[in-house]
Image (tube, rainbow, N blue to C red):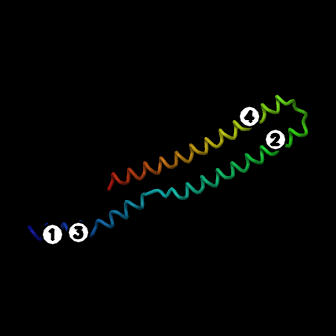
Amino acid sequence: MRRILIGVMVTFFLSFPFARTALGQDRYDFRTERNSLKARQKQERKAFKIQQKNQKRAWKSAHMTRANLAQAKHQMRREKRSMLQQQKNDRQDLKDRERLMRERTKQVR
């Protein structure tokens, strides 16, 4: 009986590292997703900056009243704030998913 118990314990301890590596294979690598998100957001900001530059250039050629110009500038600032807030929310969502996955893997172990 004692030999069987020792055999079971040795088998359990020897198979434990294999079980951990098998659990690790199911883990999702968030680094690639984080890097692609950063690259996409950088492109969005660059495209937005170019769009605003072109819009300002168009205002110079168009004769706008001061009130219309102020309103258009305010709208541009609103759009920029909205874009930056959306990007911040996207980054936070990714962090939350990472945290949730880490907690789930801790519970499994």
Q: Nearer the viewer, residue 19 or 34?
A: 34
Bin the neighbour count of mark 2 within 10 Å (Cα to Cα): few under 14, some 14-19, many 20 and up. Answer: some
Q: Nearer the viewer, residue 74 or 79?
A: 74
Specify the label residue 37 is tagged with: none
The answer to the question of whether label 2 and label 4 lie on touching residues, with beta carbons closer than 8 A, is no
Foreground mark, 2 or 3, reads 2
Foreground mark, 4 or 1, reads 4
Disc 1 target residue: 6
Give the image location of residue 29, x and y in percent: 49, 58
Disc 4 target residue: 75
Amino acid at dot 2 = Gln
Residue in the image at 66% along x and 52% along y: 42
Residue in the image at 9% along x and 69% along y: 2
Say above or below: 44 vs 11: above
Foreground mark, 4 or 3, reads 4
Residue 28 falls left or right of residue 74 = left
Bin the neighbour count of mark 4 within 10 Å (Cα to Cα): few under 14, some 14-19, many 20 and up. Answer: few
Amino acid at dot 4 = Gln
Amino acid at dot 3 = Thr
Bin the neighbour count of mark 1 within 10 Å (Cα to Cα): few under 14, some 14-19, many 20 and up. Answer: few
Residue in the image at 40% along x and 61% along y: 24
Give the image location of residue 11, x and y in percent: 23, 68
Bin the neighbour count of mark 3 within 10 Å (Cα to Cα): few under 14, some 14-19, many 20 and up. Answer: few
Distance from disc 2 to disc 4, alpha carbons, whole Å, reads 12 Å
Say above or below: 78 vs 12: above
Residue 96 falls left or right of residue 7 = right
* Pointer 1 or 3: first along the chain: 1
Give the image location of residue 16, x and y in percent: 29, 65
